[in-house]
Amino acid sequence: MNLRAYKTSIATLALCLPLMWGCERIFMDSDPDDFSRREIFDAVWKTVDEKYSFLELKDIDWDAAYQKYSQQVTEDMEGYYLCETLSDMLYELEDGHVNMSVGFNYSRYWKWYLDAPANFDYSVVERNYLREDYWASGGLKNSLLDGGKYGYIYYESFNASPSYIGLILDRFAQTDGIILDLRDNGGGALDNAEYLADFLADTRRLTYRMRYKNGPGHGDFTPYQDHYSSPKGPGYKKPIVVLTNRKCYSATSFFVTMVKEFPQVIVLGDSTGGGAGLPMDCVLPGGWTLRLSTSQGADARGVCFERGVDPDERCALDVNLSRDGIDSMIERAKEIIDAASAAQNP
């Protein structure tokens, strides 16, 4: 019997439960001792093989991963070492949405941002741009800069509601442009990303596409579903500069993908960390949980952004200026707004 036929014959031991979009891990008590180490290993491998959405896109040889790591599994190994072996195997997926929670620890892949410059210092932003008189409008911290010339918004998580964006846009009505700072925003609720994008949209536009795994084959997907952004209210027609760094992930990458379709938006900074798959949590034998991506997000042209969304203009934080309380990326955003404003009003 060949390897794939053998593994296909393994009973499905993992019950997968679709959850609402989010970027939070689940912890639970685990007791894997009621199952063999091989059963648990095979359940993890098989779940990824049939449900993970990026094996083909990333050109991952998952059969080779089975050969490499299965030989490390023995029935007398401690749960800690089994967890370590499985974590090493899952690491090969290079996906920040893939985690295995075992109670005492959880596996994760964070190299998507740890290998990149931070390009953000919240202390500089808080002390010199937000300052003590900023508005805390739900999840949107906002202030007026340089005597009201620029509107500044810091949004640290799409788990927080952006419901006050309409009020903030009214507050910023007389500004020359808006700086929307998403640096270090690791994602959250896709609904919030869509809601915020709608308030910035100039007209109805196709802004991203999504397809979902619908079978055990690596290439088994539904057709792409088109998603549109449509204006809520009058919107904001003046320049908007969106600041990004590599720690922008998941719903943040979706949002950046959406607003890049708007003509008044410029994305400034580093590529986002990616995270184009909607995650699902699966209960494994013994109560451990496996979280993995089961869909593929793409831009309006069908290009998947799992590896990140590139900015319109690359810009790095000048750490020397940061020591003097100056955020060079915010200052560059001001220059972009000034140039765009001058072009609109010669």
Image (cartoon, rainbow, N blue to C red):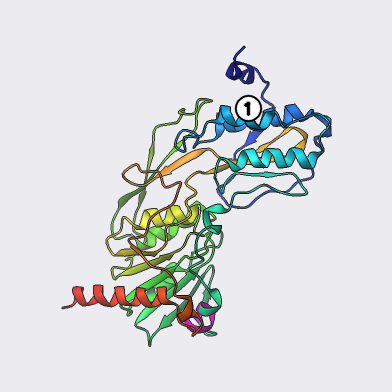
Q: Position of residue 230 (x, y in %)?
A: 34, 54
Quadrant showing the N terminus? top right
Q: Quadrant of residue 336?
A: bottom left
Label 1 crowd bin: few (<14), some (14–19), many (20+), radius 10 Å: few
Of residue 211 and residue 202, the one placed in the foreground of this image is: 211
Give the residues in magenta.
125-130
Image quadrant holding the C terminus, namely: bottom left
**Is 93 drawn above or below residue 239 in the view shown?**
above
Can you give x and y, in whole percent of width and height, for residue 199 in the image? 38, 62
Q: Is residue 39 visible?
A: yes
| Residue in the image at 63% along x and 34% along y | 16
Lateral position of residue 315 relative to residue 133, left or right: left
Residue 171 seen in the figure: no
Residue nearest the viewer, comparing 77 with 196:
77
Please check the rendered image and state whether residue 1 is part of the magenta-colored stretch, yes or no: no
- Three-letter code, disc 1: Gln
Q: Is 258 on the left or on the right of 88, as rendered?
A: left
| Outermost residue, bottom side | 147
Which residue is denoted by mark 1 in the rendering? 67
Q: Main secondary structure of the magenta part?
A: helix
Which of the 4 quarters of the picture holds residue 173?
bottom left
Q: Position of residue 244 (x, y in %)?
A: 44, 63
**Nearest the camera: 112 or 172?**
112
Q: Nearer the viewer, residue 268 or 111?
A: 111
Question: Which residue is at 52% across, 53% downward?
Answer: 112
